[in-house]
Image: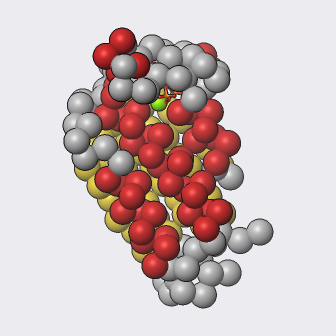
């Protein structure tokens, strides 16, 4: 139990494809919120990594999207949905090292193919759904208690 959280807290951020200038803004805001609530450092770090990777994927691959978070005394639920090309083969996309990032994205240091595996690793529950030509939604839950 994290006593500082009285009741449930939720919010959302809009994400715009190609907007590298504000990249990381949503995950930074969520991180600050969790810090204010006195959430354990290690849990904040996991939430920050998972949301940052999800946010970056929207910025890199999609036209637009939204990051929504819902914090309760038990857990943090994060949903990142986008309007974008979707993912044809999710199993392949989940593999470490698999990336379709174009050269200009790789030049910025992205495209190691580690984003989705890192989201899964840092979440207690991870689910991804995608419709080709429509978009992708990632659902992540991070528990606040042991
Ligand atoms: N939101 C998305 N929309 C469309 N395709 C996506 C999306 N997220 C991931 N993908 C596809 O899945 C692949 C793997 O994603 P992942 O985040 O694991 O690696 P990456 O973004 O290529 O590299 P890294 O995250 O390490 O910078 C991407 O290269 C892309 O083809
Ligand atoms: Mg990625």
Q: How is the image coloured?
A: secondary structure
Determine the residue positioned at 45% across, 63% down. Answer: 31
Determine the residue positioned at 32% across, 59% down. Answer: 12
Q: Quadrant of the C terminus?
A: bottom right
The foreground one among 40 and 84 is: 40
Q: Quadrant of the N terminus?
A: bottom right
Rendered location of residue 14, percent (x, y) = 25, 50
Determine the residue positioned at 36% across, 48% down. Answer: 24
Rendered location of residue 140, percent (x, y) = 56, 49
Write down the quadrant of residue 141 in the picture. Answer: bottom right
Relative to 93, say whether 56 is above or below: below
Relative to 71, say whether 19 is above or below: above
Rendered location of residue 21, percent (x, y) = 22, 42
**Residue 52 showing in the rendered view:** yes
**Residue 90 showing in the rendered view:** no
Write down the quadrant of residue 120 in the picture. Answer: top right
Determine the residue positioned at 54% across, 23% down. Answer: 113
Rendered location of residue 16, percent (x, y) = 23, 39
Relative to 10, say whether 24 is above or below: above
The foreground one among 70 and 123 is: 123
Residue farthest along the right direction in this orientation: 146
In this image, 4 relative to 122: left or right?
left
The foreground one among 137 and 41 is: 41
């Amino acid at each position: 139990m994290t006593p500082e959280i009285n009741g449930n807290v939720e919010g959302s951020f809009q994400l715009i494809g190609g907007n590298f200038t504000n990249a990381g803004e949503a995950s930074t805001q969520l991180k600050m919120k969790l810090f204010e609530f006195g959430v354990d450092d290690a849990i904040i770090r996991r939430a920050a990594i998972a949301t940052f990777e999800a946010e970056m994927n929207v910025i890199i691959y999609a036209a637009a999207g939204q990051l929504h978070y819902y914090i309760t005394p038990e857990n943090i639920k994060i949903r990142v949905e986008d309007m974008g090309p979707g993912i044809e083969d999710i199993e392949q996309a989940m593999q470490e090292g698999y990336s379709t990032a174009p050269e200009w994205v790789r030049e910025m240091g992205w495209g190691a193919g580690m984003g989705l595996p890192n989201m899964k690793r840092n979440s207690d529950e991870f689910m991804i759904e995608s419709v080709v030509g429509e978009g992708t939604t990632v659902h992540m839950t991070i528990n606040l208690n042991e």
